Amino acid sequence: MFQEYSRVVYEEKNITAYTQCANYTYSAPVTEPNPLYPEGTQLGMGKPAYFFSVSPTADISFVYSLEAAESADISVEANTVILASCKGGYGEEQKIFWQKGFPLGDSKTAQLKSGEVLTSNFTLDVPQIQSKAKEIQDQLNYSSDPTIEIVTSINYEGKINGKEITGTESFAIPVNISSTYYQMPEELGFVKNTYNNIWVQKPPSLSTVKLPLLLFLLSVVLLGAMIPVRKMSRVDPEYIERLEKEEKNSSFKEFISEGKLPENRKSLLQVEISSLQDLIDAAADMNERVIHDAGTGTYFTIHSGALYIFFDAPLGEN
């Protein structure tokens, strides 16, 4: 048990090396005269729809940060594009028929340490994007509605947790553009974890000694069971012999009844039988029942004035 408990065991674990967080926020300024809002009003996030006739543009802010388990010092470049594409096919077999990216604002660079942020601001002219996508559709003579997404790609390079790391991550949000309005989602946050697989020492646990502990307890139980067995060897031999006889004759119980030898047995013709089995067979042939006299240790049956008897050996005799 001690050997199993003290044995060094290792297990593989996924440890978060660093986490990249990104978030979009936006508002739509009212720039056109309309019956709903005064000009200059900023329409916040989460509106069901933003009308071209009221607020055709959206001011968008993208914020990125990287948090490392130990330390980080990286150079970051953020590039945002409007990605228009169209898919065709059936079910999961749909494939991209065409795809076109339109740069949105200038690229943004920064040198970040763990926890610091990069912010990129840009303006989305939704009718202009709709017009560009429609122009492609017309030239291809393809009428399906395109999918419009805002995609910001982050290229980062530098030291994270003391190691040289180079990577790219993309963060995309959809823009649903209709003929007269556009829609954008309200939840625009992203969290992406990067893990390292490491081997760590597993702390000792009682579960590792279950089997040896079970064997130990079993041996204790068996040792306790041996004590009454040894005591039985000192039981009265006559008691043991009686138990053996009862076990030996248990198969004949259904053919035997308890009783006593008749007092006038001397007037009967006495026939001695050599075994209990023979006596039972004879009684069955004569349609009689065997009687057991426990006081004399004899088995007998009476038929037509004759006493058929089997003398069982008294206790203590062979």
Image (tube, rainbow, N blue to C red):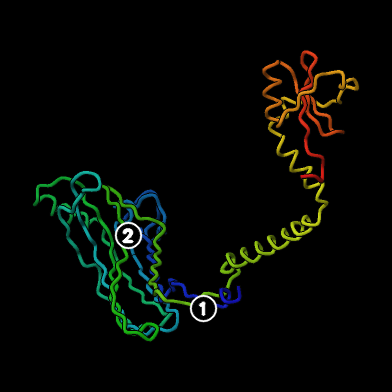
| Image coordinates for residue 3, horizontal then vertical, percent | 57, 76
Q: Residue at x 25, y 56 (%)?
A: 148
User: Who is closer to the viewer here, 120 or 249?
Assistant: 249
* x and y, in percent, of residue 89 in the image: 18, 45
Query: Going 66% across and 64% down the picture, which residue do you hit?
Result: 219
Tag 1's secondary structure?
loop
Q: Is residue 76 left or right of residue 238?
A: left
- Of the numbered discs 1 and 2, the one sitting upstream in the chain is 1
Q: Quadrant of the N terminus?
A: bottom right
Nearest the camera: 312 or 248? 312
SS at badge 2: strand
Q: Is residue 284 left or right of residue 75?
A: right
- Label 1 to label 2: alpha-carbon separation: 49 Å
Which quarter of the image is occupied by the C terminus? top right
Q: Position of residue 44 (x, y in %)?
A: 42, 59
The type of residue carrying mark 1 is Val
Where does label 2 land, which residue?
A: 173
Q: Position of residue 56 (x, y in %)?
A: 29, 56
In the rendered view, tell whether residue 23 sits above or below residue 240: below
Residue closer to the observer: 17 or 300: 300
Answer left or right for 289 relative to 71. Answer: right
Q: Nearer the viewer, mark 1 or mark 2?
A: 1
Q: Residue furthest right?
A: 263
Does residue 277 sit above or below 139 in this rendering? above
Which residue reaches farthest top? Answer: 304
The residue under label 1 is 8
